[in-house]
Structure formats: structure tokens, C-alpha cells
Amino acid sequence: MWIVAAAPLMIKCVHCEDCGWVCEAHQDKPWEGPHACPCGAPGAPCPICNATNDGDAPRMPDGFKTEVDKDGWRH
């Protein structure tokens, strides 16, 4: 009889656990997911895996809908 262990979940970014966002007040804790920071501070782009260059927007969280952008309200 063979016993096969499940492969561990591989996380690429230890700061945000691959969601791309960290707690603004505690940037070493993810903003989403099972280990999300419970403090209630807003999210910020992860400085490790979701850093942006001048003029670029960060990768947004799943399900994010833009309502206002640089051109105003979207209808």
C-alpha cells in the first residue's frame, strides 16, 4: 500500500500570500485571505510583488470594479 502525501501549497510572496495587497498599517501581513490582517486598515499594493512604475496602476484584487477613474465616473 502506497501513502501519498499532498504537495504543500507553494506561496510565492510571503508578504501578501499572492493576493497582491497588504495591510497599509502592517505591510508584512496580507490584506485578503485566511491570514488577512484583522486591524481594519485599508489595503496597499504589495511592495514586493505588486509594485508599480510611474503612471502604472497596481494589479487589482479579484472582483474589483472601477467606478471612478482619471476621466470621471464610469457608467
Image (tube, grey):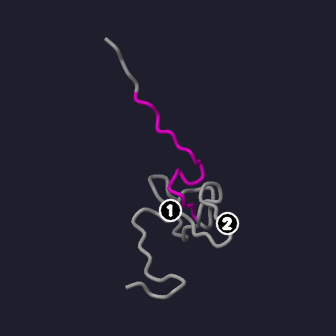
**Quick one: 13 or 31, which is closer to the camera?**
13
Q: Is 67 situated above or below 47?
A: below
**Quick one: 73 or 29, which is closer to the camera?**
73
Q: Is residue 25 left or right of residue 7?
A: right
Query: Residue at position x 40%, y 29% from top?
Result: 6
Name the residue furthest left.
1
Q: Main secondary structure of the magenta part?
A: loop
Residue position marked by numbered label 1 in the rendering: 38
Residue position marked by numbered label 2 in the rendering: 53
Q: CA distance from mark 1 to mark 2?
A: 29 Å
Residue 15 highlighted magenta (yes or no): yes
**Region in magenta:** 6-23
Which numbered disc, 1 or 2, marks the residue that appears first in the sequence?
A: 1
Could you say where residue 30 lies in the image, as x and y percent from the top left?
54, 57
Query: Residue at position x 44%, y 76% from top?
Result: 66
What kind of residue is marked 1?
Pro
Image mark count: 2
Q: Is 4 situated above or below 37?
A: above
Q: Is residue 75 left or right of residue 14?
A: left
Residue 9 highlighted magenta (yes or no): yes
Query: Residue at position x 47%, y 83% from top?
Result: 68
Q: Secondary structure at mark 2?
A: loop
Q: Is 3 situated above or below 20?
A: above
